[in-house]
Image (tube, helix red, strand yellow):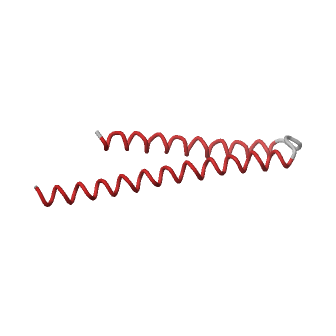
């Protein structure tokens, strides 16, 4: 059950990471397409917030993947010892 929950969490984080990347790309495209658009300070703030969200999501994903590898390796070692 633990693996299923972690797999689900990893999948959620991967989706969130992809969505954050798409938001950032969309924002960049909109900025390039609109000559005026938002004032530069607001564009920078929005872009920075999205980049931070992307970085946070990526860090969470990497942490879950590390935990999964550690748990999987530990259980594999136990299986070898008791198998």
- Across and down, in percent, residue 9 comes to 43, 41
Q: Where is residue 44 in the image (x, y as percent from the top left)?
A: 79, 50
Rendered location of residue 50, percent (x, y): 67, 46
Quarter assignment of residue 72: bottom left
Please tell me which residue lies in front, 28 or 33. 28
Q: In this view, does 63 lie above or below 3?
A: below
Q: Which of 53 and 28 is in front in this view?
A: 53
- In the rendering, at what x and y percent does residue 29 appear? 74, 45
Q: Which residue is drawn at 54% across and 52% down?
A: 58
> Residue, x 73% and y 43% (percent of image)?
27
What residue sits 66% from the left and 51% below the top? Answer: 51
**Figure quadrant of the N terminus:** top left
- Which residue is farthest left? 83
Residue 1 vertical placement versus 54 (above, below): above
Above or below — where is 32 with respect to 70?
above
- Residue occupying the point 21% across, 60% down: 77
Which quadrant of the rendered structure holds the C terminus?
bottom left
Q: Quadrant of residue 46?
A: top right
């Amino acid at each position: 059950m633990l693996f299923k929950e972690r797999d689900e969490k990893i999948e959620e984080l991967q989706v969130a990471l992809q969505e954050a990347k798409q938001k950032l790309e969309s924002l960049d495209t909109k900025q390039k397409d609109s000559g005026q658009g938002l004032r530069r300070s607001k564009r920078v703030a929005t872009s920075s917030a999205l980049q931070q969200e992307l970085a946070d999501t990526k860090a969470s994903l990497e942490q879950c993947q590390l935990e999964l590898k550690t748990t999987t390796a530990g259980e594999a070692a136990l299986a070898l010892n008791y198998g």
